[in-house]
Image (cartoon, rainbow, N blue to C red):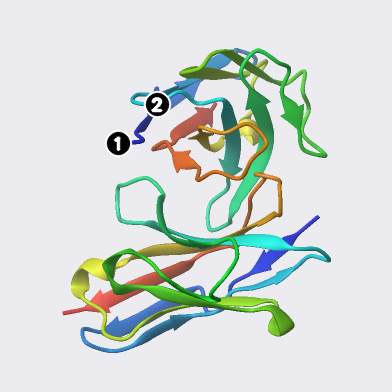
Amino acid sequence: AQSVSQHNHHVILSEAASLELGCNYSYGGTVNLFWYVQYPGQHLQLLLKYFSGDPLVKGIKGFEAEFIKSKFSFNLRKPSVQWSDTAEYFCAVSPLGNNRLAFGKGNQVVVIP
Amino acid sequence: GAVVSQHPSRVICKSGTSVKIECRSLDFQATTMFWYRQFPKQSLMLMATSNEGSKATYEQGVEKDKFLINHASLTLSTLTVTSAHPEDSSFYICSASAARGRLETQYFGPGTRLLVL
């Protein structure tokens, strides 16, 4: 079964700072990769996903993520965060051809105005 | 589009009773629905996958007789926690996708917080 690691559970930064959240997975085969976001009081929403092709994926709200197969990583980035980016961010992985998601523990990001 | 609702949003029950949680896809037909459980400060753990009209597939360690899943229509799946005990207290989240087997984006419901006294 696949597993997902997210480090630095709590991240606090100021507006306009750059954000990078790490995601590493362990799985022997080909995977599909996702980042979900949960804003306070709301349900999980898809930020971006990688299935195949260009390993640099652009998502909503200025977020992007890069799949590095050799490092089993799918790190999320945003060059300049806003207060409205305060949320919890989850990385998730599913095996190719299978929709069963394994989630990381999440990163609680707080952006200070 | 792609809205998923859950009902109730929170429920408190006595130990030994059964609780039913509904998951509905409001604006699309969900051939596959998933049920997750989330403990405080932990990640979502997949409990089971249900395809419309067939039996649910449970993840290892999840008791199928305790967590009954029914996916009777393309817009509704239910999770029944039978004979609930305090250790079943948790946050239960469903998701729905429009594809069976093929990879498709999952859309998540808002979750149901269960507290068993």
| Mark 2 touches mark 1? (CB < 8 Å) | yes
Most extreme residue toward the bottom is A17
**Label 1: which residue?**
B1
Other residues around mark 2 within 10 Å, as few (<14) / some (14–19) / many (≥20) = some
Horizontal side, residue B32 vs residue A20: left or right: right
Percent from the top left, x then y, of residue B102?
A: 64, 40
Residue B28 disc label: 2
Amino acid, disc 2: Phe
* Residue at the left extreme, as displayed: A113
Query: Could you say whether the residue bearing mark 1 is in a helix, strand or loop?
Result: loop
Is B115 placed above or below A25 here?
above
Q: Nearer the viewer, residue A111 or B25?
A: B25
Q: Residues within 10 Å of mark 1 (few under 14, many from 20)?
A: few
Mark nearer the N terminus (2 vs 1) = 1
Q: Are marks 2 and 1 on the same chain?
A: yes
- Residue at horizontal 31 percent and vertical 47 percent from the top: A42
**Does residue B94 sit above or below A79 in this rendering?**
above
Q: Quadrant of the N terminus of chain A?
A: bottom right
Classify A58 as above or below A17: above
Chain that bears disc 1 = B
Q: Quadrant of residue A23?
A: bottom right
The percent coordinates of residue B27 (x first, y second) are 34, 25
Q: How many marks?
A: 2
Quadrant location of the C terminus of chain A in the rendered image: bottom left
Q: Chain of mark 2?
A: B
